[in-house]
Amino acid sequence: MENVTIGLALAAGVLSFISPCVLPLVPAYIGYMSGRLTHNVSRQTAAGTAAPVGLAFRLQMLLHGIAFVLGFTGVFVLIGLLTTALASVAGQHVNTFTQIIGRIGGLVIIFFGFQFMGLAPRFFAWLRKKGQAGILDNVLLSIAFALLGGGIIYWGFLEQTVIALPLTFALALAMFAKGAFTQPAVFWSGFLEWLETLLYSDTRGDIGSSGREGLLGSAFMGMVFSAGWSPCIGPLLGTILTVAATAGASSGDIAQGMLLLSAYSFGLGIPFIITALLLNSAQGALRRLQRQMGKIKLASGSLLVAIGLLVASGQLQSLSQTFSRGEFADFTLRVEECGVGFFEGELGISHVGACLNGTLLPVAINQSASGHFSAEITEQEFLFHAESGDRIDVEVRSVGEEIPEFELVLFGPADAELARGSKADSLMTEGKLYPLADLALNEAGLYRAVMRSASATDVARFRVKVRDAQAIAGAVADASPAKEAEAEGESLAGTALNSLSELAGDLAPPVGLAEGNRAPGFTIDTLDGASLSLSDLSDNVTLLNFWGTWCGPCRREMPEFQKAYEEWGPRGFEIVAIAFNDTEAAMADFRDEFGLSFTLALDNSGDINDAYAIQTRPSSYLLGKDGIILARHFGIMTETQLNQLLSDAYAG
């Protein structure tokens, strides 16, 4: 997945619609679209229009669905770029940006709810009727509106006086210029007329036939929902965000990142557009329920008000985060793994069901996948694609407790058994078992490695890797004394260059989040109760990993980190894994489950997460011994990727 294509990004978006993180968005979207549908049918009925006129009008829900997706895409792409490719410039302000959109947008959604209920038009009509009695012609109404508007601005912009005061002053100045305090009746009559025109709620009931009414409103709804939603970051989106970050950091050309994020967002939007078409077919049923239209409008509008409250209070994003934990996160990870496997030809249609159930996992050659045995689960299957002439090893490594007795059977593309091995017969190298080694594959296609155990009582976790035996043999052959000496010489030269760099204090890079910047400093208490500062790690290459026990993708990469820590630790490599929105008890259980020995810490305040503009978990920053950011990675980091980064870090 390192070479992400537009097609893969689009498929990733479609797959993400199935993920639990999107669940809170679905009722919110349906609530808005059904409210608009009910409102339109009610207006048609009031105007005496028997049926929609014209193709555009019949497809108006489709147009609104597309507008919603476009608004959603715009903000999603912007946030993605701010948190990756442009993180050093604006990444730390993304939280503020999204919270402001959420608060202001939530209020607008609530107002739409009252509009769809029919309460807002009735209130406007009441104001006009009572206006003759002096309500609209009272300057106190203008003063009250200015004070209320100022309060909303202050709250909507996160109680930041430096922003709220100028905006409140501008509101009061605009009202004064329009005569709100000198001719209030004229001002308020014009304001109500403008507002009704904006909302397309003309009390005369004249209905247009274009079906394009309020498209900006639907686009705005998409923007609000996007800002108030946290996506599940799995292998697919994580890789896309990494590509966006790399493009922006290396060449300044972020077009590739924008294109991939846009493709992902449009893929996510396809099911929303289909939903709009399905809702559009309900217009006939609504017309047959004219007598119940008042109750239907009240219900749909009330749902929209409830959604607006969720968005304005930030609870919609909290729901998304809740659905990104535990079993929900595991299911999301399986959906992405199975979807990518099918899209890239590593998974057949007959394997999808077993893959989604978690009993079969796709695995690429030279990358590993997790599995486990228990009293209930005694068989795990791993599927990989190979070419004719490939030679492979199958490596099995325990994670935590020792693996019980097992048997491993390899099946070919025709589902015929090719080889069989067991734990008792395995070769062992550096604690890794090789039940199948140096196998020659005679045809291209999908191969299944099936592990079976009948003796597991407690949960026993393990990792399986299908290795390219030829490439590994070549790498061993290259490890000659001459090459080792050459590598040592390069290392000494690199050390000398680093020493010269340290002397150039006046040219020290600025603090920031881009590669080449100095990482923001911090102090944090570790899970063991010690106080740790970033400056304490100045003699080490350090991986800062932002994670959570509830993060499904984190469960995949943590064992890889432990393996890298054991291999590279003696050379001065440290890992600091910083959790957020978590508990120390859950972190301790996680550490024991995976046998982690590197540093874990909890960012209770969220200040460190904000300083590093963390929007996705897992996210990682690799720092050199001088505290300079060498690399950034968003999403799962594989063993191959981490080893390559560390090789580059120590070679330089």
Image: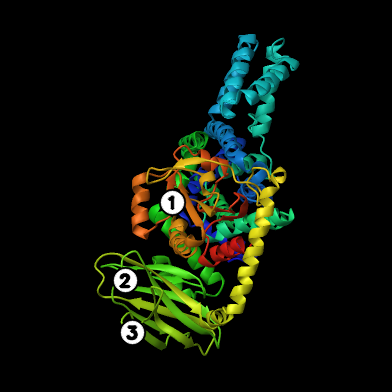
N-terminal-most mark, 1 or 3? 3
Q: Secondary structure at mark 3?
A: loop
| Residue located at (74% from left, 17% from top) | 178
Camera-side residue of 339 and 624: 624
Q: Quadrant of residue 541?
A: bottom right
Q: Secondary structure at mark 1?
A: strand
In the visual, does 188 lie left or right of 321?
right
N-terminal-most mark, 2 or 1? 2
Q: Could you tell me which quadrant the C terminus lies in?
A: bottom right
Q: Quadrant of residue 159?
A: top right
Q: Looking at the picture, does residue 601 appear above or below residue 172?
A: below
On the image, the x and y values in percent for residue 316 come to: 48, 41
On residue 401, the disc is none
In the visual, does 56 lie left or right of 553?
right
On the image, the x and y values in percent for residue 436 come to: 41, 83
Amino acid type, callout 2: Ile
Question: Disc 2 to disc 3, how far (Cα)?
Answer: 14 Å
Nearest to the eye among marks 1 and 3: give it.
1
On the image, the x and y values in percent for residue 550 come to: 41, 51
Residue receiving disc 2 = 403
Q: How busy is the neighbourhood of tag 2: few (under 14 within 10 Å), some, or many (20 plus)?
A: many
In the visual, does 305 lie left or right of 206?
left
Q: Looking at the picture, does residue 355 appear above or below residue 88?
A: below
Residue receiving disc 1 = 599
Q: Quadrant of residue 520?
A: top right
Q: How busy is the neighbourhood of tag 3: few (under 14 within 10 Å), some, or many (20 plus)?
A: few
On residue 425, the disc is 3
